[in-house]
Image (spheres, helix red, strand yellow):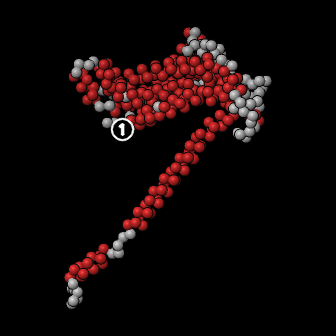
Amino acid sequence: MSQPGTPPTQTAAAQRESREGPPKKKGSDQGVVEQRSAAQIWGKSALLLVILLWCLFPFFWLIMTSLKRGDRALNSPDLFQGPFGLQNYEAVFQQDFLLNLRNSLAVAGMTTILCVVIGSFAAYALARLPLKRKILLLSGVLAVSLFPPVALVPPLYELWRTLGLLNTWEGLYIPYTSFTLPLTIFILTTFFASIPKDLEEAARVDGASPFKAFYRVIFPLAAPGVFAAAIIIFVAAWNEFLLASTFAPRNAEVAQTVPVAIAAFTGAVEFQRPIGTITAACVVVTIPMIIVALLFQKRIVSGLTAGSVKG
């Protein structure tokens, strides 16, 4: 009850204040939130900077070592101790390295084309046809890629020697395709499965054949996944060493690839380890891959994530 002589409006206001408590300081709360947000941003930025330096340092070491002249690349652990020059790069291209680049590009390109074409049809069939035990079949396809290639080298070598496929491009991209095709099928199956079937049915209603509906409608929609799979296949074929060193170990004019050529580099004198020449060749080989990754990073990321959600 209100005391005598006290206005009713003042009494009601006092009761509301007693229920609500002291007024909140909006400015101080907002300042705390802003401080926390700024601290989180700085913390994330620092963590990303550490990760970036951790990833880029090996490549920085590779470049600095490749620029060192003479025996400095081998005997001097100081990255900034010269003299520096481009002699190692000149030595690389004096050893028919352009022919090795041509061979690696041809073999990796053919492997990528074969895997994308064959893998697309196989993955589309697994994603669309009503096959029994489809998961078991897909698991078996993926298990083939886990088989160690070194166990197949002796019989393949004898077979290739009989067929005359040693020191040829065909002798390299055929086994490369066999080993990378299961992974291609596994990647592309998820993308084709994520594309709605209504699009194919609409294309067929319009008079398109199943094959025309595939390459006119479905295949373009799966382009991010196809592109991501192609990049993975190309890099794997570009860096492969075991089969290349067994089936085409010599003769850069025919089929010797870049990894085998780098392993065969020799120093200026006997028993000298050509660290400078090897690092220069590694820089020459790595730069095109980095440029491709930077140019198409959005497609690669979208390709690796788009098939994870079925729409």
Q: Residue at x 25, y 23 (%)?
A: 203
Residue 34, position as x, y percentages in the image: 44, 59
- Residue type, mark 1 in image: Val
Residue 178 x %, y %: 49, 21
Mark 1: few, some, or many residues within 10 Å (few <14, many ≥20)? few
In this picture, residue 226 sits left or right of residue 282:
left
Residue 113 in view in this figure: yes
Up/down of 21 relative to 102, above or below: below
Residue denoted by label 1 = 309
Nearest the viewer among 176 and 279 is 279
**For the C terminus, which image quadrant?**
top left
Q: Position of residue 145 (x, y in %)?
A: 49, 27
- Which quarter shows the N terminus? bottom left
Q: Is residue 249 left or right of residue 213?
A: right
The image quadrant of residue 276 is top right
The one nearer the camera, 97 or 7, is: 7
Q: Quick check: 21 above or below 257?
A: below
What residue appears at the point 53 percent right and 47 percent down from the top-left corner? Answer: 48
Label 1's element?
A: loop
Name the outermost residue toward the right. Answer: 269
Whether residue 299 is situated above or below residue 28 in the rendered picture: above
Quick check: can you spot residue 144?
A: no
Query: Residue visible at 34% across and 31% down?
Result: 193
Residue drawn at (55%, 27%) of the image: 288
Q: Nearer the viewer, residue 260 or 279?
A: 279
Farthest residue to the bottom: give it.
4
